[in-house]
Image (spheres, helix red, strand yellow):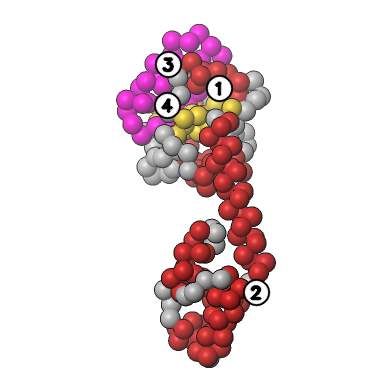
């Protein structure tokens, strides 16, 4: 018997999940939770085998719940249920050791297979979607490391201040350097990154994942 806690802030989805598992002979639904905090309380109270967890929830979202559970022992297997995959969220979930990621558009029988596979010690990831999301995140990280290798630590600091909307005088005051020195740094930054000005610098840093 696989003992489950289900967490989703949409009543229709939550009740649908409950009905899906309750008609299966090898599942027992222990609790239905409309937010992340209640999910944590239910896990601590019932000690389920597996938690099916909506990524987007009130009070505490899925990633917050996952972080707190991973700091506790014993912690259940966790499958994240999500309507859409955000690259950074997928990367963080995998880093935190989530056992599965399932899209809400997935067919019910696929979700049942995912839960059984995870409970048996495997993993279940939407391989195509998750793989693409992770690859995009790795690519951005590589680009960010590349930019950080080109700029000095001070130049990167000034670049981020510029992207944050600070003027040269304000940057100088914060860093205890003259406005002229800030201008010299900016000239070097523009030259190294091949950007013509402040706005383009901000866009560049955003594209590279540095702000």
Q: Between tags 1 and 2, which lies in front?
A: 2
Looking at the image, residue 191 sits to the left or right of residue 54; the answer is: right
Indicate which disc residue 152 carries.
Answer: 2
Classify 190 as above or below 114. Answer: below
- Observer able to see residue 3: no
Residue position for label 4: 105
Residue position for label 3: 20
Q: Secondary structure at mark 3?
A: helix
Which residue is at 37% across, 26% downward?
14
**Spatial separation of the CA atoms under disc 2 and disc 4:** 46 Å
Q: Quadrant of the N terminus?
A: top right
**Spatial separation of the CA atoms under disc 1 and disc 2:** 47 Å
Residue 141 spot, x, y in % from top left? 61, 54
Q: Are marks 3 and 4 in contact (CB under 8 Å)?
A: no
Q: Examine the structure image and report whether residue 191 is included in the region drawn in magenta.
A: no
Q: Are marks 1 and 4 in contact (CB under 8 Å)?
A: no
Q: Are marks 1 and 3 in contact (CB under 8 Å)?
A: no
Q: Secondary structure at mark 1?
A: helix
Q: Between tags 1 and 4, which lies in front?
A: 4
Residue 44 spot, x, y in % from top left? 52, 34
Q: Between tags 3 and 4, which lies in front?
A: 4
Which residue is at 39% across, 40% downward?
57
Looking at the image, residue 86 sits to the left or right of residue 138; the answer is: left
Q: Earlier in the sequence, mark 2 or mark 4?
A: 4
Q: Are marks 1 and 2 in contact (CB under 8 Å)?
A: no
Residue position for label 1: 114
**Spatial separation of the CA atoms under disc 3 and disc 2:** 56 Å
Write the start and end of the magenta stretch as one range: 1-28
């Amino acid at each position: 018997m696989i003992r489950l806690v289900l967490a989703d802030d949409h009543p229709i989805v939550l009740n649908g999940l409950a009905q899906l598992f309750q008609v299966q002979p090898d599942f027992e639904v222990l609790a239905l939770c409309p937010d992340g905090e209640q999910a944590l309380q239910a896990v601590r109270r019932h000690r389920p085998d597996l938690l099916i967890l909506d990524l987007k929830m009130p009070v505490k979202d899925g990633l917050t719940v996952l972080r707190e559970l991973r700091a506790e022992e014993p912690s259940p297997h966790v499958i994240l249920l999500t309507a859409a995959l955000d690259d950074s969220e997928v990367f963080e979930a995998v880093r935190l050791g989530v056992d599965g990621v399932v899209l809400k558009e997935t067919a019910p029988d696929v979700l049942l297979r995912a839960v059984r596979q995870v409970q048996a010690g495997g993993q279940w990831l939407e391989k195509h979607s998750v793989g693409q999301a992770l690859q995009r995140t790795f690519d951005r990280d590589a680009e960010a490391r590349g930019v950080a290798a080109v700029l000095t630590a001070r130049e990167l600091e000034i670049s981020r201040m510029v992207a944050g909307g600070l003027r040269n005088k304000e940057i100088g005051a914060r860093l205890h350097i003259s406005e002229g020195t800030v201008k010299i740094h900016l000239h070097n930054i523009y030259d190294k990154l091949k950007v013509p000005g402040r706005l383009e610098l901000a866009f560049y840093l955003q594209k590279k994942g540095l702000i």
